[in-house]
Amino acid sequence: MDFEDTPQEAAFRAEVRAWIDANAPKHLLAELKNASFASNGVVSEDPVSAGKAWQKKKAEAGWACLHWPKEYGGGARTPIERVIWGQEEGLYAALTGAFTIGHGMCGPTVMTWAKEEQKRELLPPLASGETIWCQLFSEPASGSDLAGLRTRAVKADDGSGDWIINGQKIWTSGAQVSDWGLLITRTDPDVPKHKGLTMFFLDMRSPGVEVRPIKQANGQSSFNEVYFTDVRIPDAQRLGEVGQGWEVSLTTLMNERLSIGSGMSTGFPELFRFCMEMEIDGAPAVEDAGVRSKLAQFAVKQSGLKYTGMRAISALSKGETPGPENSIGKLVAGSAMQELSMFALDIQGQAGVIWNDDSPQKGRFQGMLMRSPATRIEGGSDEILRNIIGERVLGLPGDIRIDKDVPFKDIPTSGRKKK
Amino acid sequence: MNLDFSDEQKQLREQVRRFLSENCTSETVRTILEGPESYDRKLYQGLAELGVLGAAIPEEYGGVGLGHLELCVVAEELGRVLAPVPVSSSIYLVAEFLLLAGSEAQKQAWLPKLAAAEAVGAFAFAEGQGRVTPAKIKASVSGGKLSGVKSPVADGDVADVAVVAAKNEKGQVSLYLVDLSGKGVSRTTLDTLDPTRGQAALTFDGAAAELLGGEGDGWNIASQVMDRAAVLMAFEQVGGADRALEIARDYALERMAFGRPIGSFQGIKHMLADMYVSATLARSNCYYGAWALNSGAAEFPVAAATARVSATTAFQHCAKNNIQVHGGMGFTWAFDCHLYYRRSNALALALGSLSTWESLLIERMSAGNAETAA
């Protein structure tokens, strides 16, 4: 066991550090540091433009998408080098949040399923931040039950081979700023639900695409609804065969869990700092026995996640593939965030209800309280993640699925009665 | 960066697991639970012969001279099978006390015997109800003679030698090495939650006591050794947690209800998933503790408390839910669930209770840098 860098790792770290020191937008660092939970961080300039500028700079120097091959604009680096980059990039990584879905999920899906010339056309601008991608998967009636989706793709009757899309997606992060979307549709309702799906990539500026922001429970609008009215997609933009959409979507979902779950913070360092500053009965809160007990339990969750991540990296560096056990990252962090924020407000007493710039850490914990319910749902709900751990890690039997062999059109779904 | 055991350490794990699968079955544990003996002498002797008791003891003192990482590997395996042996008292504690603070003569006298299972050691710290604090220690030494009552003392019923925390003539907490076969020592075996690890009350009435480490340095030394023992015991706890989860998982696959294996019901499946999560977080924290113990890192006290809190929580969580998964069968004497439940709760109190360690962890983090552990 060893936490130290090898000489090669140390040399790589030094190279990264020097480059970041010379090139990072240091004028934004103070803002990134003080960003309250779940806000965009940068407000003094347009956050998307600031993110694009930083990504472009990284790409030009070969630091973009370190996990991608070079021919698609990536850095072709080892897992350990990616970790070192992440550690050194630190808070600046938050600048490029708009690319998370493209780089972590859409890119790998395109890389697996698109034709070679399409990969060479689509991936380098995604890597360098010129294009933003979104993921058009969830629907109002099908979240966790993704394969129950109803957005239809029908062949145009003009002989062009194009597809005509009608329907609605929801919970689409970043749709309002996206150039491309990865879109899963139903092409055959007469076969069981997983078999009648087909995946496309779509120009988000196509006629008939309408993006409507959703006002969320926490007052922000980072998700959208996307409506499709007779939207036309060329057949060349199909990923995989007709009817193979479910298989294609699994590439995306697998990458999503890897991308979201690893290295999530529970907010513990901020809570700890707060408990050092806040007083109970004239002494720092951190000296109170009840506070200590709670803090200790949050502390061991945070460090357990950190070292579980390090074990996964150790396995990666030996050439092993990270498996479904990585589902624990978001499962633990999501609920810890929610409990931790409730506890931080509890210590604030009645004033915990106040959520403004004068609140401790500019209202970070109030923001966390109001954002954490979404964390426990997005990218696989707690319940879905527990199913994955139960079934794919522990080998327990799958849920009984009564709709498995039934043609999709005959399955009752929310808002549609069985005929 | 590499947070994993080496191939050699993994081979040692396999070797110990094989040995224990033959020599420490559920029957072995039950024989101690229900019989008059308070540990399995043959098993303990076998472990000594295998060289694992002396894994972290240098060769010049009769050990194998590997290191603490190897001892962590061994501890996990002992925890998986609930080995009824006094290894935590003798090896994690007394041997470590000698290695850290013993004089050359004290090391020579006792370490070879401890490594060979020819002698058993015990650490006499608590004096009745409540958390141990310096103020609570009433045992005292005057003119080399120890008086007082220590209770409970893990493995105190079978120990040959004890490290005793007592106050010197100036009222400072110091540590003393006491040969328990000498005059002025009497012991009473105590009824406990987990008879597979014996406990006793030791009464000293002018027993010969030899200073271990510096005068007045007892609290400091004890704290350092308890941290070491905490990491080793945390590995036992993680081994136990993992095994309790495996037993529960196997039962959930085999037991049918409403026409299907109970493991296909989300109520059970999600409980098992949560057991996996707590065992996994604890294991990762234990690896961090093992690394800090073995490398002597400055963050060791934080790492030790982290491993301890996490592993205690995980073992209790897995052991109690193992019974729940089994339903009524889990509450029978015939099933092994209660063996894990007993051990999980007994280990949660050994070396100081969970709340004591939670408090220690946060105290240490406030003194240092919170970000280190986060």
Image (cartoon, helix red, strand yellow):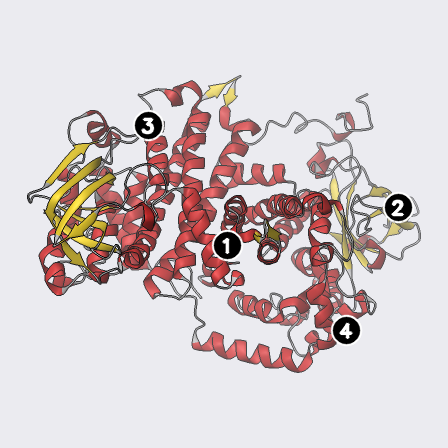
Image quadrant assignment for residue A81: bottom right
Q: Which residue is mark 1?
A: A303
Q: Secondary structure at mark 2?
A: strand
Q: How far is disc 1 from disc 3 in space, using C-alphas? A: 32 Å
Q: Disc 1 residue type? A: Ser
Q: Earlier in the sequence, mark 4 or mark 2?
A: 4
> In this rendering, do the residues under marks 4 and 2 share a single chain?
yes
Tag nearer the camera, 4 or 2: 4
> In this rendering, do the residues under marks 1 and 2 share a single chain?
yes
**Percent position of residue A319, x then y:** 46, 60
Question: What residue do we see at 49% from left, 34% from top?
Answer: B272
With A309 as the anchor, is A407 left or right in this view? right
Callout 2 touching callout 3 (CB < 8 Å): no
**Percent position of residue A57, x then y:** 72, 77
Tag nearer the camera, 2 or 3: 3
Q: Secondary structure at mark 1?
A: helix
| Residue placed most toward the observer, B55 or A246 | B55
Regarding residue A159, the answer to whether it shows in the image is: no
Q: In the rendering, which numbered label is found on residue B336? A: 3
Question: What residue do we see at 41% from left, 43% from top?
Answer: B354
Q: Chain of mark 1?
A: A
Residue A379 versus residue B337 in the image, above or below: below
Q: Chain of mark 4?
A: A
Q: Which residue is mark 2?
A: A228
Q: Disc 3 residue type? A: Asp
Q: How far is disc 4 from disc 3 in space, using C-alphas? A: 62 Å
Q: Which residue is mark 4?
A: A53
With B210 as the anchor, is A317 left or right in this view? right
> In this rendering, do the residues under marks 4 and 3 share a single chain?
no
